[in-house]
Image (tube, rainbow, N blue to C red):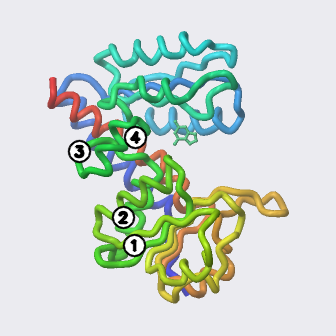
């Protein structure tokens, strides 16, 4: 029987801490931290995510707003919005919600964000800082995974970690964080040979593939820490992770559920990143 990590409870604790520290920030500098979101188009999932981010920012005592922009917005117009936020001293964090509408090239938009305000940690400067051990903003979901491991008391230094998935948003940055915490890290992906065999060697297994219930209990080393970043629907339309929880839970030492594991941590860490950006910008001014 594994220890099941309650991501909702940890996220609530993080958000409470951030709200407390944000109140101190506001008192100290005479202005609240500011988070600004650009949401272009009408992707329904994005609308829900952004609404949650907006609510969390409000509860944290942040200033800021969401610019809801039409799907017909041009590349130049969207870039102008980012430039405006870069130039605004009251803005500490800029988040451009993905995916962007068809016809918009995402890369130049993300690279235009001032790295000091890059609360998603997607800018190449942020990525470079992460891999070279320099201070910078770290992507929210990977940062949330690390916090969950820490909260569960999982030892990382010297351990063998396997990350399944090589995306820029989750797989690669979490590998960098685990490496920085002195794990021996392997990044696996769709072309990895004998994936079950590799997973069975992992003391820490991070699943970020996006395939419902792919990782079975007999892929897991007894006692391993299993972090499930997946967010899928099963055959019955029910929310599920990349890990087959029913077969994995009896084998794992600690495990995150879906929903209620990694998911709630992403927004909590976005709040944390915004406050961090605000402090850094204030210290640099
Ligand atoms: N769309 C889905 N997840 C994310 C995220 O973490 N950041 C941004 N900007 N867009 C997303």
Please tell me the numbered disc located at residue 121: 4
Give the residue drawn at x 64%, y 83%: 217
- From the viewer's perspective, tell me whether residue 2 is left or right of residue 150: right
Q: Quadrant of ligand 1?
A: top right
Asked if ligand 1 lies within 8 A of label 2, the reply is no
Residue 52: give x, y in percent of width and height.
Answer: 56, 39
Residue 256: give x, y in percent of width and height.
Answer: 54, 69
Mark 1: secondary structure: loop
* Of labels 1 and 3, the one closer to you: 3
Q: Residues within 10 Å of mark 2 (few under 14, many from 20)?
A: many
Mark nearer the N terminus (1 vs 4): 4
Mark 2: secondary structure: helix
Q: Is residue 45 visible?
A: yes
Give the residue drawn at x 48%, y 65%: 187
Mark 3: secondary structure: loop
What is the C-alpha distance between the residues marked 1 and 3? 25 Å
Asked if ligand 1 lies within 8 A of label 1, the reply is no
Q: Is residue 272 visible?
A: no
Against 19, residue 254 (above or below) is: below
Give 91 or 163, whichever is nearer the viewer. Answer: 163
Mark nearer the N terminus (2 vs 4): 4
Give 153 or 110, whichever is nearer the viewer. Answer: 110
Against 272, residue 172 (above or below) is: below
Q: Residues within 10 Å of mark 4 (few under 14, many from 20)?
A: many
Q: Which residue is mark 1?
A: 152
Give the quadrant of the N terminus.
bottom right
């Amino acid at each position: 029987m594994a220890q099941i990590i309650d991501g909702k409870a940890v996220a609530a604790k993080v958000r409470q801490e951030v709200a407390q520290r944000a109140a101190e920030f506001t008192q100290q500098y005479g202005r609240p931290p500011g988070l600004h979101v650009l949401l272009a188009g009408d992707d329904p999932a994005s609308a829900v995510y952004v609404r949650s981010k907006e609510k969390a920012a409000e509860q944290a005592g942040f200033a800021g707003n969401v610019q809801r922009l039409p799907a017909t917005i041009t590349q130049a117009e969207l870039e102008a919005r980012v430039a405006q936020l870069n130039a605004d001293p009251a803005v500490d964090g800029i988040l451009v919600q993905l995916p962007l509408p068809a016809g918009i090239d995402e890369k130049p938009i993300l690279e235009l964000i001032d790295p000091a305000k890059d609360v998603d940690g997607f800018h190449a400067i942020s990525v470079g800082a992460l891999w070279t051990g320099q201070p910078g903003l770290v992507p929210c979901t990977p940062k949330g995974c690390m916090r969950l491991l820490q909260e569960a008391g999982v030892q990382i230094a010297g351990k063998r970690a396997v990350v399944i998935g090589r995306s820029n948003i989750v797989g690669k940055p979490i590998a960098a964080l685990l490496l920085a915490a002195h794990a021996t890290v392997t990044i696996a992906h769709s072309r990895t040979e004998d994936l079950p065999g590799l997973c069975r060697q992992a003391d820490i297994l991070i699943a970020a593939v996006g395939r419902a219930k792919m990782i079975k209990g007999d892929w897991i080393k007894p006692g391993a820490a299993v972090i499930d970043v997946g967010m899928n629907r099963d055959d019955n339309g029910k929310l599920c992770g990349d890990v087959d929880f029913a077969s994995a839970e009896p084998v794992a030492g600690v495990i995150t559920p879906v929903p209620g594991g990694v998911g709630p941590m992403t927004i909590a860490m976005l709040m944390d990143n915004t406050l961090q950006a605000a402090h850094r910008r204030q210290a640099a001014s």
